[in-house]
Image: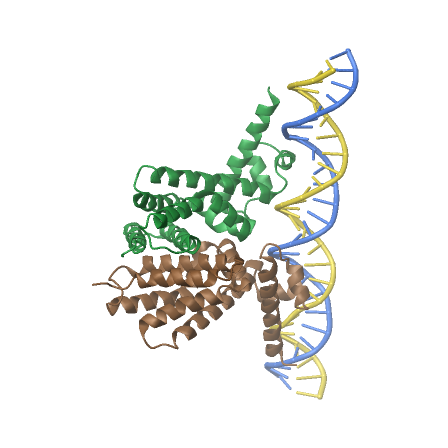
Chain colours: A green, B brown, C yellow, D blue
DNA sequence: CGAATTCACATACCGTCGGTATGTGAAGCT
DNA sequence: AGCTTCACATACCGACGGTATGTGAATTCG
């Protein structure tokens, strides 16, 4: 059997199984023994591919964030108007982030395990970047009042992260439209009323 | 020496030292040996007062959140007008939450260690409750457009949490006024424009 | 006022965890 | 064919969270 192929296959199995377990039980509650057991390899294999448990988790977070970023971008790209792209992107983020798997890994354990600085850098590299860019475009076009982009993007990003966590726990089916409505109101208020 | 008094003193020392260490190094990086060493007691004492490491952390989080809640309420209470109370409370929260000690314990490790549900309940019991109440009052008074309070409070709470984390890392001194400005704009847009 | 009891810890120990050092056998190269 | 590489497997370690038991001073009771 081809060696390079086998290597990739082992690595893929480790990341996939780790992702499932981390999502289900949380980072701290998952042992390396469980992960290598699920991936049908040994701890030696894991440490041949990753230098620590946190490094493996880092790769998992990267994968989740990239997927979220892609789905947000895809939703935005179905529109041509920059404003509609922003709204669609925000709603897509809210929808994707309701997935409990995404939540635990990306929003809860991510910052605590990797440190907020590192987590933030990864967030910026994936989904948050789209938000910043979209807002910048809208400000340039005069649709949104001229103001520093970074703080605004941070506020909105935090609002949506929290909203997603809250939504996933909510039992009332009316909560989703209610949040969407509140978010839309918030976005709408950004439009320059000159 | 009085026994009850000694008991309280030991417990207080454990909570205080644990808080300092958790804030400085994060929950996972602090061992019970370090905590009991700093408090000048033994592990037996710790487990006589708390049933687990997480239970001790829970008490620490409770303490931090209560302090934050009190300071937010105090800032709001310097005003009579409900709207000004809201704005003052939000700004106070932003100021208090910039403290790295508050951040790591309350915003980063809290949800990951205790679980988001439990963390959320504690948050609601302390500072978030004030936000919800203030918004409710304003809606009742017709200052803010009539809408479900919960989603709105969640969005604002998340926005401020994230902003505080971002601010604490920022090096640019202009970032604080920039965020305050963006937040004010966001709050202002809530006012009913009928 | 002394014996009995309670209680606030201290001591000693355990299983499990993340991490490491070393062994091994098949695949690739010469 | 034989040497080398490399992708793991095996065996082991110190440290950690947690527990079971011991102990001595403070309190209670007859």
Q: Is residue B56 above or below residue A181?
A: below
In-image side of A54 versus B117 (left or right): right
In-image side of A60 versus B123 (left or right): right
Looking at the picture, tell me which residue is in the foreground, A103 or A90: A90
Q: Is residue A11 above or below residue A192?
A: above
- Residue A54 percent coordinates (x, y): 58, 45
In the rendered image, which quarter contains the N terminus of chain A? top right
- Residue A93 percent coordinates (x, y): 38, 45
Q: Is residue A73 above or below residue B110?
A: above
The residue at the point 47 percent across, 62 percent down is B176
Q: Is residue B7 above or below residue B135?
A: below
Looking at the picture, tell me which residue is in the foreground, A173 or A134: A134
- Residue A108 percent coordinates (x, y): 48, 51
The residue at the point 39 percent across, 77 percent down is B78
Locate residue C2: give its quadrant. Answer: bottom right
In the rendered image, which quarter contains the C terminus of chain A? bottom left
Locate residue D11: give its quadrant. Answer: top right
């Amino acid at each position: 059997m081809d060696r390079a192929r086998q290597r990739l296959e082992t690595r893929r199995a480790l990341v996939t199984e780790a992702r499932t377990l981390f999502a289900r039980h949380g980072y701290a509650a998952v042992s390396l023994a469980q992960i290598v057991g699920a991936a049908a390899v040994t701890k030696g294999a894991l440490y041949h591919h990753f230098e620590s448990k946190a490094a493996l988790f880092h790769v998992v977070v990267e994968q989740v964030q990239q997927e979220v970023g892609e789905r947000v971008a895809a939703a935005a790209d179905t529109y041509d108007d920059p404003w509609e792209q922003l709204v669609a992107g925000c709603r897509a983020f809210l929808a994707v982030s309701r997935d409990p798997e995404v939540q635990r890994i990306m929003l809860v354990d991510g910052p605590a395990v990797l440190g907020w600085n590192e987590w933030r850098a990864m967030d910026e590299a994936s989904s948050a970047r789209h938000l910043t860019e979209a807002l910048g475009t809208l400000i340039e076009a005069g649709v949104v009042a001229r103001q520093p982009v970074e703080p605004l993007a941070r506020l909105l990003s935090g609002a949506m992260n929290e909203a997603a966590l809250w939504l996933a726990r909510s039992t009332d089916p009316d909560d989703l439209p209610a949040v969407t409505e509140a978010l839309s109101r918030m976005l709408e208020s950004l439009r320059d009323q000159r």
